[in-house]
Amino acid sequence: MHIEQLDIPGAFVITPRQFPDDRGVFMEGFRGDALAEHIGHRLDVIQTNISVSSKGAVRGIHYADVPPGQAKYVTAVSGSFIDYVVDIRVGSPTFGQWCSVQLDTDTRRAVYLSEGLGHCLAARQDDSTAVYLCSATYRPEREHGINPLDPDVALTFPAGLEPVLSPKDTAAPTLKEAQRDGLLPSYDSCREFIGSLSERAGLG
């Protein structure tokens, strides 16, 4: 598989090599050793999540307090999504910026985002299903969100897609409000935590 860093530090797109034949197709969906070469430590998968979304459903922008945060490895097993990684780490050189990758069942790409980054998915088709490999369990008291329609973040959705948000995401603060209220992780704390994972793995 091919692993490439995105424009946001700590975010990667993973493209598997596919092996089709008359029975269908086979590929590696996740390689912990290959990913570790890029992120400096093994992704310790503690929880897996599955979301099934109708067209237009927008999930995010979500993130967790660091430490421990929650790193994610996300791929589509049906349908199609736009996956957005948003840099919400105060002090980061790319703070407030975002990048996006289309996840679908043609390329079978995945996105990895490290602890402290914001994440958002927008479904392009009905019954689009995503699988998340997560480095930590869901802890509601440590989970936060940024409104995905925040004009300062300015996520660009596909033409013709009408965003459908949950009440929680609709009520989420803007990036500026979250920063004002001290809800965002700092770039330095994220780097320190991820560095500790690398040291424990003997890769730092």
Image: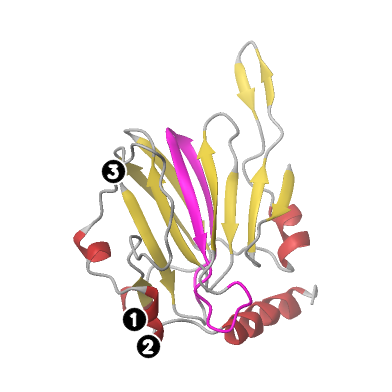
Name the spot of residue 108 as percent of width and height, x first. Answer: 58, 36
Which comes before the other along the chain, label 2 or label 3?
3
The residue type indicated by label 3 comes to Glu
Label whose residue precedes the other's in the sequence (1 or 3): 3
Q: Residue 71 colored magenta? A: yes
Residue on which the image places disc 1: 177
Q: Where is the N terminus found, in terms of image quarters?
A: top right
Residue 52 point in image, percent of width and height: 33, 42
Along the viewing direction, whichever of 93 and 4 lies nearer the viewer? 93
Dot 3 corresponds to which residue? 162
**SS at badge 1:** helix
Residues at marks 2 and 3, CA–CA distance in whole angstroms: 29 Å
Q: In the image, is residue 132 above or below residue 107?
A: below
**Which residue corresponds to the image point at 28% horizontal and 43% vertical from the top-left?**
162
- Give the residue at mark 2: 180
Q: Is residue 106 left or right of residue 58?
A: right
Circle 3 SS class = loop
Between 152 and 83, which is closer to the camera in this rendering? 152
